[in-house]
Image (cartoon, grey):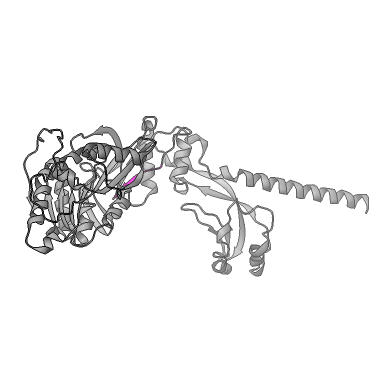
Amino acid sequence: MTLCGRFCCIVNRNRTFLQTTVSRFLLAMSESLFTPPPGVRGMEVLDRQAFNLTVQVPAIKIPTKAIGGLLKPLKSILLKRPNTKKVVDIPDDQQHKVLLFDPDKVEPEENLTGEHGKLLQENGVTAAPHLYDLQLGYESWTAQEVLTAVLPEGEVTTAFSRVGHIAHLNLRDHQLPYKTLIGQVIMDKNQGITSVVNKTNIINNTFRFFSMELIAGEDKTTVTVKENHCSFEFDFAQVYWNPRLGTEHERITNKLRARDVVYDVFAGVGPFSIPAARKRCEILANDLNPESYKWLVHNTKLNKVQDRVRTFNMDGRQFIQEVVKKDMIDRCQAEDADLQDHTSHVIMNLPAMAVEFLDAFVGLLAGETLQEYRPPMIHCHTFSKADDPAADARHRVEEVLGAALPKDHYIHRVRDVAPNKEMMCVSFQMPLDVLLTHQGGTDHAEPDRKKLKTET
C-alpha cells in the first residue's frame, strides 16, 4: 500500500472512531436530553414560554407512501414524547416525511441493523439517521419533568388523589411556596381536572374531615364519582371520601349475601351501604355529619336503593345502643322466619376512633329474651403504629370488649397510611357473652346531638 493509501486509511479509521465516540456521547447524554431549560429552577409563577427548548434527535427521511407500513414495525424505537409528533412534514416536499427516533435506541450516523434496518431497505431507505432539530414546548413535558425542573431537588411531588374533577394534594411545608404552580401544572397535564386543592392540617374533630384550600382552578367542590358500579355525589369540602379505599369497600361488600342485614355505624355518603343494598341486603346506615347524612340520603335515591336503606343522623354510640339494639331484638323475637334467617354485619369504618365505640356492645342485649340468636359479624377499622399492627389491633379490640376474640377472627391489612402507620380491619363474630353480660363498662356522656332523623 502506498503512503497516500495508508494515510487515507488512518484518516478513515479516525473519522469512524470520532463518529462512534460522538454518537456514544450523545447516547449517554440522552437521559438529560429531555430536560426543561435550567432557567426554570425556582419558578413560583408558571411561565409556560420558559419551557421552550430545541433538542436534536435521530431522524430519517422516508417516502410518504411508506410511512403507513413502517410505523407499527418501528414503534419500539420511535420517539415517544407527550404532544410531540413522531412523523414531521417537510416543507415543499409532499413525497417525503421525516421520521423521528428515540435517541436512547437509535444512534445518529449509523445505519439501523437487524430487522429494522432490513425493513427500511425494503422501503428504499438506505441513509443513516441524521440529527434533527426538534422544537419542544411546555406541552411536550410531563408533569414530573416540569416539577422536577422547577422545584428544589428532592422536593418534587406529582402524587395526588383524584375525586371527580378535583385533584387532592397533601403538600409539605417546604412545597407551599410553589403550591399555585404545582396546582396549575397538575391541572394542565391531567384531562378532566378543573380544581386542585391542598389539604391543610386543620381537621374537624366532630365530623372527622380535613379542611382544604383551593390552589388552582374553579372553586367547585361538589363532585360525582363512580366506585364499585355505583354513583356517588357529595360536597368534597364537607364530607370524608378517600378514593384509595375503593378496594376495601369492595372487599367487605363481597362478604355479604342477599338478605343480610348491615349496620353501617359511620356510613359517610354510602360507599359500603349502597353497594350492599344493590346486593339486596337490608341496610341501616348512620352518620353524625349532617352533610354526610344529606348526601347519603341523596345517593340512595341516585342509585335507586332507597327502599332497602334506612338512614340515620346520630352519634355512633347512640346508633348502636338504640337503633341497632332495637333492630336486633325485633328480628330475634319476630315470628316471621324470614326475619330471623339472616346474617348481620356491623361495619365500623372510622379508623381514628372506631375501636373506642366497641364498648357500646358490652351488655347491649343483657336481660333480653333471645332464641337461637346469632351475634353479628363486626368489621372494625383502626390505625396502628406498632411494630406488629395485627397484634396491636387485636389487643386494643379485646381490651375494650373485655373478652378474647374468637379463634376464627381475621385481621386484614388495608393500606399504608403514612410511614410506620397502617390501616387495619379486625373482623370477628361478636362474642355472645359480651352482648348478654354487662361487664362494668365506662359510662359515656350523652352526645350533644340527640335528635334522631330517619328516612324510610
Residue 431, image x, y percentages: 21, 47
**Along the horizontal axis of the image, is 379 left or right of 11?**
left
Residue appearing at x 87%, y 48% in the figure? 7
Q: Quadrant of residue 332?
A: bottom left
Q: Quadrant of the N terminus?
A: bottom right
Nearer the observer, 356 or 289: 356
Residue appearing at x 25%, y 32% in the figure? 202
**Along the horizontal axis of the image, is 3 left or right of 455?**
right
161 drawn magenta: yes
Q: Which residues are magenta?
A: 158-163
Nearer the observer, 171 or 354: 354
- The mark total stands at 0
* Residue 287 versus residue 255 in the image, above or below: above
Q: Quadrant of residue 362?
A: top left
Residue 137 seen in the figure: yes
Nearer the observer, 291 or 347: 347
Residue appearing at x 76%, y 47% in the figure? 17
Nearer the observer, 63 or 70: 70
Residue appearing at x 80%, y 51% in the figure? 12
183 drawn magenta: no
**Along the horizontal axis of the image, is 141 left or right of 235?**
right
Residue 405, image x, y percentages: 27, 44
Residue 388, image x, y percentages: 38, 38
Q: Quadrant of the C terminus?
A: bottom left
Residue 215 seen in the figure: no
Residue 164, image x, y percentages: 28, 50
Furthest-right residue in view? 2
